[in-house]
Amino acid sequence: MTKRVQPSQTGAFYAQAVASFGISVTAMVVALVYMPAAGWVRAFLALGLLYVVTSTVVLCKVVRDRQEMSEVTNRVDQARLDKLLTEHDPFKLDM
């Protein structure tokens, strides 16, 4: 029976990803607040930033869900193959 190697996620990688996201969003918000432009321009850019952030979160969820679906399908296929291999006896004589 073969066992797939699953990639692992370390705590440091998770912390780095969260920190990177927080720093980038904070930097964009600070830039929007101190940008020398009219209020409606800043509001429009803030709305664009919000749209980018929400669409990124949705894309991440879709990619994760698709990966989990393919993983379940692979497990079912692997279980079927393992069952066929264990039931097959190449030295059995059919009479």
Image (cartoon, rainbow, N blue to C red):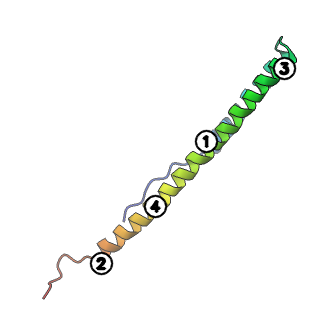
Find disc 4 in the rendering and name its residue: 73
Identify the secondary structure beneath mark 4. Answer: helix
Q: What amino acid type should be assigned to the residue bearing mark 2?
A: Glu
Q: Nearer the viewer, mark 2 or mark 4?
A: 4
Q: Residue farthest to the right?
A: 39
Q: Nearer the viewer, mark 2 or mark 3?
A: 3
Q: Residue farthest to the bottom?
A: 95
In the image, is 2 to the left or to the right of 30? left
Q: Quadrant of residue 42?
A: top right
Q: What amino acid type should be assigned to the residue bearing mark 3?
A: Trp
C-alpha distance separating marks 1 and 2: 42 Å
Q: Please tell me which residue lies in front, 70 or 4.
A: 70
Find disc 3 in the rendering and name its residue: 40
Q: Nearer the viewer, mark 3 or mark 1?
A: 3
Q: What amino acid type should be assigned to the residue bearing mark 1?
A: Leu
C-alpha distance separating marks 4 and 3: 49 Å
**Circle nearer the N terminus (3, 1):** 3
Find disc 2 in the rendering and name its residue: 87
Q: Please tell me which residue lies in front, 75 or 49.
A: 49
C-alpha distance separating marks 4 and 1: 21 Å
Identify the secondary structure beneath mark 3. Answer: helix
Q: What amino acid type should be assigned to the residue bearing mark 4?
A: Thr
**Circle nearer the N terminus (4, 1):** 1
Find disc 1 in the rendering and name its residue: 59
